[in-house]
Image: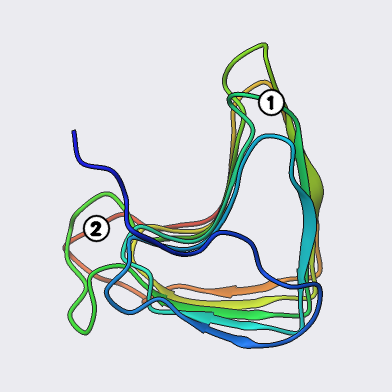
Amino acid sequence: MQSARTCDIKAPPAGGTYDGTGCDIVIYYSAGAEGSVKDALVTGGKRFGILVNGDAGDVSVDIQDSYINQIGDTPTFTGNQYGVAIYYRAFFAAGSATGRVSGNTISQYQKGGIVVNGPGSNVQVQENTVVGLGPVSFIAQNGIQF
């Protein structure tokens, strides 16, 4: 198994451009982290734009008023089942993934816009604009998935 190449471990509290071209994950939060992504541009990751992973312990991240785009196989998207703009996960009893996702604009993603998975995930999702690729024959996209 190969480990993912992550561009930024954590984003600063406000603003900034995060270009993950050449990386699997643009911004990654793991167990024990608290943070926020606000007024940011997150672009270019192959597998994830922002990944909040609560599998091994509690993590809480708010993502607000940001633009997340071009996540997946770019410049030509494929049918590979990755390319998620915002992903919260907490599948094991050891942890949780919580936060708020609001006021974001998410576009040009390969598989999913906002995905919240696992019994330990509790995320408030509201007032986001999520725009997929439109009708395509190579993949079934999910805008917002719980």
One can see residue 123 in this view: no
Q: Secondary structure at mark 2?
A: loop
Question: Toward which corner of the image does residue 73 lie, by quadrant?
Answer: bottom left
Using a 10 Å C-alpha cutoff, classify the residue at mark 2 as few (fewer than 14 neighbours), some (14 to 19) or many (20 or more): some
What residue is shown with label 1? 57
One can see residue 118 in this view: yes
Mark 2 to mark 1: distance in Å?
32 Å
Identify the image quadrant of the C terminus.
Answer: top right
Residue found at x 33% / y 60%? 24
Residue 77 place in picture, x, y as percent: 22, 73
Q: Is residue 5 above or below residue 45?
A: above
Residue 88 place in picture, x, y as percent: 61, 44
What residue is shown with label 2? 139
Mark 2 or 1: in front is 1
Answer with left or right where residue 18 lies relative to residue 80: right
Answer with left or right where residue 76 lies relative to residue 14: left
Residue found at x 38% / y 78%? 44
Which comes sooner in the sequence, label 2 or label 1? 1
Using a 10 Å C-alpha cutoff, classify the residue at mark 1 as few (fewer than 14 neighbours), some (14 to 19) or many (20 or more): some
Residue found at x 44% / y 73%? 132
Query: Please, what is the three-letter code of the amino acid marked with disc 2?
Result: Ile
Residue 58 place in picture, x, y as percent: 75, 30
Answer with left or right where residue 113 lies relative to residue 88: left
Q: Secondary structure at mark 1?
A: loop
Identify the image quadrant of the N terminus.
Answer: top left
Q: Is residue 106 above or below residue 118?
A: below
Q: Is residue 118 above or below residue 53?
A: above
Q: How many marks?
A: 2
Query: Please, what is the three-letter code of the amino acid marked with disc 1?
Result: Gly
**Is 120 in front, or is 13?**
13
